[in-house]
Amino acid sequence: MDQGALRVALVSPSYFAEDSLIGGGERYVSYLARALRQATPDLPFALDLEVFALGERALSFLDGDVPVTVFPNENPQRHAMAAMSHHLWQALAPFDVIHIQQGLTFFGAYCAVIGRSLGKTVIVTDLGGGENTLMLGHGGLCMVDGIISISEFARAITKTYFKGPHIAVIGPVDTELFQPRPDIKRSREVLSVGRLLPHKGCDRVIDALPDGLALRLVGRAYDNAYFDLLQKRAKGKNVTFVTDADDVALKAFYHTAGLYVHASTFTDIYGNRIAKPELMGLTTLEALACGMPVAVSNTASLPELAPDPRFSRVFDEVAGLRVVLEDYKAGRWPSEDVAGLARAHTVENYSFPVVGRRIAEFYAQVHAGRQAA
């Protein structure tokens, strides 16, 4: 480790792998580590980076060229968002900045105590894993030096409780992995990717689908009752479910489908209210990076990902989505140069080098402020 560098540890309650969790929050940490690594050559300072996570057993591996160390979760409850490990005190001691992922959970509070006890600069990010009353209701954010939110919607949740340095940075997304394939002819298929859970609104996409359009729903079925409901609602319609897609298959779907739909909702089909249904919408960014037009619900952070009507539309309810799908079916939308527009917007705003530099500079700013204070 370069003693003259800014030394940063990303700390997460889980990691992106089949033997851990494979949701957007875990992919975010992996993407962030690689984004920071790509941004390093262009920074005015050196940056050393490692990732620490908790899991079922001890592991160490490289994510790209970023070292990842996994310590066993010592909490008897085994829940990831309440994970604990005494190893973190020693592991984090050499670092200047501790960036805690899922920072509003019990895990976040636990790691903030560790960081503060070690005298480190502590930065947190909420990835939607839940909230612990200590962090929001009882002043736990006083242990924090800065917050990085992954959207303006996410920033609004914590800004009432924290008046220190705070930025909203959408992304990053791997624009090298997810690229357009102009050599592959796109179909008229509609694509939606995400865990098959009620708050993702997959039922709304099925209900809005007009005759003559096909829909592919890609994601793991974590709720059997909801998956049964989706299959029943899809009867008589051209709907395909893919519950075991890997990254290779996912890229193929991004390259062959014609329209991406993200339909998350604050109120699911059972009437349940969800406070944070979508803090960023990473799959929408992946679709845009592949040159796809996107239609997103007017929910949480998603409208932030749809700034240009030439390649993006925002809908309110099922009826609004049906209008978008009818326009798509009839060829009234999107723009003919949609692929280039969507791709350029994503690279300029959400790519690894762009986001990595913004976050690294925030680390340095907050750390310098703490040292000066």
Image: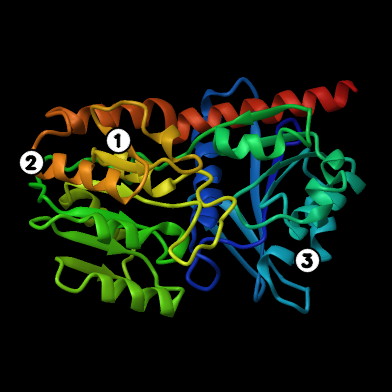
Identify the element where label 2 is drawn. helix
Position of the C terminus, as image quadrant, is top right
Which percent across, then down, holds residue 66? 56, 49
Q: Is residue 52 above or below residue 31?
A: below
54 relative to 91 in the view: left or right = left
Identify the residue position indicated by label 2 in the image. 330
Identify the element where label 3 is drawn. loop
Nearer mark to the viewer, of 2 and 3: 2
Identify the residue position indicated by label 3 in the image. 84
Mark 2 crowdedness (10 Å alpha carbons): few <14, some 14-19, many ≥20: few
Which percent across, then down, holds residue 172? 47, 39
Earlier-in-chain disc, 2 versus 1 = 1
Q: Using the image as rendered, state which of residue 158 and residue 269 is in the foreground.
A: 269
Position of the N terminus, as image quadrant, is top right
Q: Is residue 305 above or below residue 215?
A: above
Which percent across, then down, holds residue 247? 33, 59
Give the amino acid type for the residue marked by disc 2 in the picture: Ala
**C-alpha separation, residue under disc 2 versus residue under disc 3:** 54 Å
**Residue ID at (38%, 25%):** 348
Identify the element where label 1 is drawn. strand
**Residue ID at (80%, 34%):** 145
Identify the residue position indicated by label 1 in the image. 313
**Residue ID at (30%, 55%):** 192
